[in-house]
Amino acid sequence: MKLIRHVIRFFVAAIVLLLIAAIVPGFQLNHFWSAFFAAIVIALFCWALEKIFGEDISPYARGVIGFFVSAAVIYLTQFFINGMKVSLVGALMAALVIGIVDLFVPIKGKFKASAE
């Protein structure tokens, strides 16, 4: 069941990346599968960064550092995915759009249950 949840998250992330490609200049994806594999690569980059630097460096962390890390991850992903081209400005704009989307539809739970 957990595998299905991850696959669904990657499909949703791919759709978000395709929408970003439609509205952000300097951000191009050729087809759905490029977006799907880009979502996987972005998730792997984020996981590796969190393991090395802790959760505060994550692109999902709030603040300027998270924003620039998100833009860097998006920019670097293009070197691993055929059919994806991103300029520096496109990566910054995509990180901004993803940040705005994350405000309304968070990927991770913002509230944790407190032990009482």
Image (cartoon, rainbow, N blue to C red):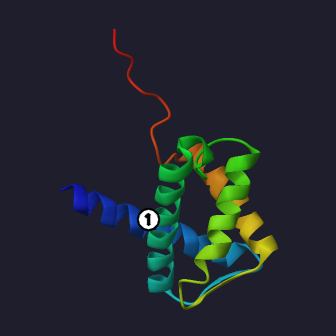
- The answer to whether residue 33 is left or right of residue 28 is left
Density class for disc 1 (Cα within 10 Å; few <14, some 14-19, many ≥20) is: some
* Pick the front one: 50 or 5: 50
Which residue in the rendered view is the most extreme toward the top?
116
Which residue in the rendered view is the most extreme toward the front?
52
SS type, badge 1? helix
Percent x, y for residue 97?
Answer: 69, 59
- Residue at point 79%, 74% (across, down): 88
Percent x, y for residue 87?
Answer: 76, 79
- Residue at point 46%, 44% (across, down): 108
Percent x, y for residue 93?
Answer: 76, 65
Q: Please tell me whether residue 30 is drawn above or below residue 23 in the rendered image.
A: below
Quarter residue 68 falls in: bottom right
The residue identified by callout 1 is: 12
* Pick the front one: 66 or 17: 66
Q: Please tell me whether residue 9 is drawn above or below residue 21 in the rendered image.
A: above
| Quadrant of image for the C terminus | top left
Can residue 97 be seen here? The reply is: no
| Quadrant of image for the N terminus | bottom left
Quarter residue 26 falls in: bottom right
Can residue 18 be seen here? The reply is: yes
* Pick the front one: 5 or 115: 115
Which residue in the rendered view is the most extreme toward the left?
1
Amino acid type of the residue tagged 1 in the rendering = Val
- Residue at point 54%, 91% (across, down): 82
Total labels: the figure holds 1
Percent x, y for residue 113?
Answer: 38, 22
